[in-house]
Image (cartoon, helix red, strand yellow):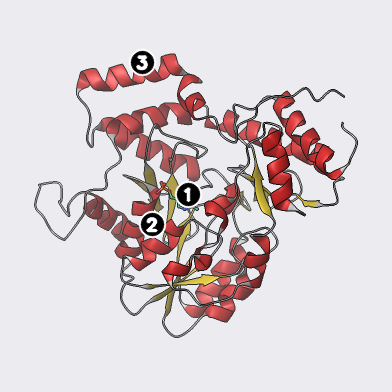
Amino acid sequence: MSNKARNVPFFNYPYVFTSREEQFMETIRDVGRRGAFIMQKDLAEFERHLADYVGAKYAVGVANATDGLHLAVRAAGIGPGDEVLFASHTMVATAAAIYFAGATPVPVDCGPDHLIDPESVRAAITPRTKAIMPTQLNGRTANMDELLAIAEEHDLIIIEDAAQALGSKFKGKCAGTFGLAGVISFYPAKTLGAFGDGGIVFTNDEAMYRKLLLLRDHGRDEDGEVVMWGLNSRLDNLHAAILDYKLTYYDEEIARRREIARLYKTYLREVKELVLPPGPDGDPDHFDIFQNYEIEAENRDALREYLREHGVGTLIQWGGKAVHQFEKLGFTVRLPNTERLFQRCLMLPMNTSLSDEDVLYVSNTVRDFYGYPRV
Ligand SMILES: *Cc1c(COP(=O)(O)O)cnc(C)c1O
């Protein structure tokens, strides 16, 4: 009944470290005392473990997911003259990965679950279309049956931006393993968060794997011979060791996120002014990991201000605009669903530092705003 004021920040950055500080320090000491900083066994082990975790043949650690997407696009042979379709409700990184490969990023609309809309994909295909880059947004995997069918029909490559979706599944198959490559981010606020930047690329294709290894390390092969142009985009060995430890309890973290989603759904279901995200129990085809809890809300800006006044941090993804809405990037397309969504979408706090009482407090504050009795 009571709704005593509390502070619920949108994200708790210190908690990323303090949650298991002693174990992290042990890992840091172990790696540091071995002097194992670049491309050492901890990286190889972590790559193996994460590939096994998602059911991919290969994994290549990279400096961040943006690099991972860019290297995947280049390794796939996508370049000048090619068009690549992506959902505009994504981080600009998805489009930048295409742009810096010399190809043309083509934004498409999203559907009711906020993910790429297959109909919009179909409508945007031209003779120059080479690939689709679906973003597995908010920890949910798109309906890949439809996208794979479109890709097959038009002979298109699929590269998944699965930055937000480690362990998320569609029909039992993990995000990042459906296409030629898939990329995960270890940005601190991501579900498997590092103490800085990091990312990984999955692929089942051996040629792709070999190219990614070269591209991330100056184009050098095992003998140090430079066999192609490459970059420096390695995942730090220290970070790999820390992430490998975090992977041992990752499933518990996801279970907790799904529990928080369940609580939000219980407390907010009857609020007619909101549209809640799907899941976690609604649809057996989807296993969502809730990187974010992105709702749609009537009177969104006033709700956001009310929550702020009551100590609750919220966020609108990507600074409040879909990629095609950033004027300086020069897109001219109109995407009605995405544009409507960006007047309504809002992310409530969703992370493992939240207590049940925090979730109840956030929910009751939302209920207060719309005039529903507290629970
Ligand atoms: C976080 C994120 C990225 C970028 O990841 P970095 O590791 O920070 O480069 C790309 N796409 C999506 C959808 C993201 O959420």
Secondary structure category for the residue under label 2: helix
Q: CA distance from mark 2 to mark 3?
A: 32 Å
Mark sitting earlier along the chain (1/3): 3
Q: Are marks 2 and 1 in contact (CB under 8 Å)?
A: yes
Q: Which mark is residue 49?
A: none
Q: Which residue is mark 3?
A: 26
Write the residue at 32% across / 65% down.
100
Mark sitting earlier along the chain (2/1): 2
Q: CA distance from mark 2 to mark 1?
A: 9 Å
Q: Which mark is residue 69?
A: 2
The answer to whether residue 107 is above or below residue 230 is: below
Ligand 1 within 8 angstroms of badge 1 C-beta? yes
Q: Amino acid at mark 3?
A: Glu
136 and 108: which is toward the camera: 108
189 and 30: which is toward the camera: 189
Q: Are marks 1 and 3 in contact (CB under 8 Å)?
A: no
Residue 277 seen by the camera: no
Residue 218 at x, y percent in the picture: 17, 52
Q: Amino acid at mark 2?
A: Leu
Secondary structure category for the residue under label 1: loop
Q: Amino acid at mark 1?
A: Ala
Secondary structure category for the residue under label 3: helix
Q: Which residue is mark 1?
A: 163
